[in-house]
Image: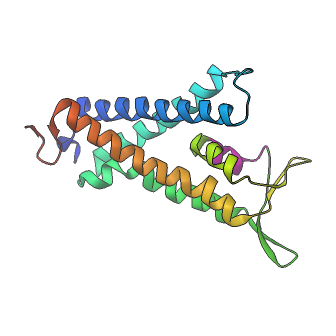
Amino acid sequence: MAIKKFSVRDLLRVIVVWTIINVFFNATALFLTDYLNDSLLHLTFNFTSFFSFITFQSCYFGLILTVSACILRKKFIVLYAYSLIQFIVLHLVFFYCLKTEEGVLNFITDMSGIPLKIINNSGTDISYVLAYFFPIEGLFDGGIFWPDNLERFYLLIILVPILYNFFLTWLADRVVKILWKLNFDKGQRI
């Protein structure tokens, strides 16, 4: 077992710091999205929706971090296991929903389908800020989700959350090292 390298306290520190940073970035992005859409006067912060999204991500991150710490030996792989799994899952969903219509490759799914739920739970509000500047247009009626621009959809909805998770994990690791002056590589205090 590789758990000897990570104490439960160290794992909890990473999970808590990761969650706090994630809440900060997503709340900032949500506020910025409302500001860009001129809806600050009607700002309706849906507490339940926002925190259920963050809670899901934090629990998912914590579970993957804990399991990977129990079975893996490399610190890098343990820390970035969540991001690697997100990379695999989001690409599986993306390729699963690719269909050829009229000789053109498209991403097509239904609005209530599992693929779209996975994408929504794995995403970040930063994608919505970017979508303001680079809107995703397409067919969204009748329960069908069919974006016109496949490349833009891939960049905003698949790639941005993956890069965000890598950055978030890297930042959380740095903040934990700074706040508690830990050296995870040697498993001892500096």
**Depicted 9 relative to depicted 108: above or below:** above
Q: Looking at the picture, how far across and down is residue 45, in whole percent?
A: 66, 22
- In the displayed image of the protein, which residue is found farthest to the right? 142
**Depicted 41 relative to depicted 6: above or below:** above
Q: Determine whether, in the image, residue 186 is placed left or right of residue 76.
A: left
Of 108 and 148, nearer the camera is 148
Q: Looking at the picture, how far across and down is residue 64, in whole percent?
A: 41, 44
Q: Determine whether, in the image, residue 126 is placed left or right of residue 85.
A: right
The total number of labels drawn is 0
Q: Looking at the picture, how far across and down is residue 163, in whole percent?
A: 47, 54
Q: Main secondary structure of the magenta part?
A: helix
Could you tell me which residue is drawn at 61 percent across and 60 percent down? 155
Q: What stretch is highlighted in magenta?
A: 112-120
Could you tell me which residue is drawn at 34 percent across and 47 percent down? 170
**Depicted 4 relative to depicted 155: above or below:** above
Instruction: Assess whether residue 115 is covered by the magenta stretch.
Output: yes
Q: Can residue 75 be seen in this view?
A: yes
Of 4 and 187, nearer the camera is 187
Q: Can residue 7 be seen in this view?
A: no
Report the colour scheme.
rainbow
Of 148 and 102, nearer the camera is 148
Q: In which quarter of the image is the C terminus?
A: top left
Could you tell me which residue is drawn at 64 percent across and 48 percent down? 119
Q: Looking at the picture, how far across and down is residue 4, in whole percent?
A: 17, 42
Could you tell me which residue is drawn at 55 percent across and 30 percent down? 27
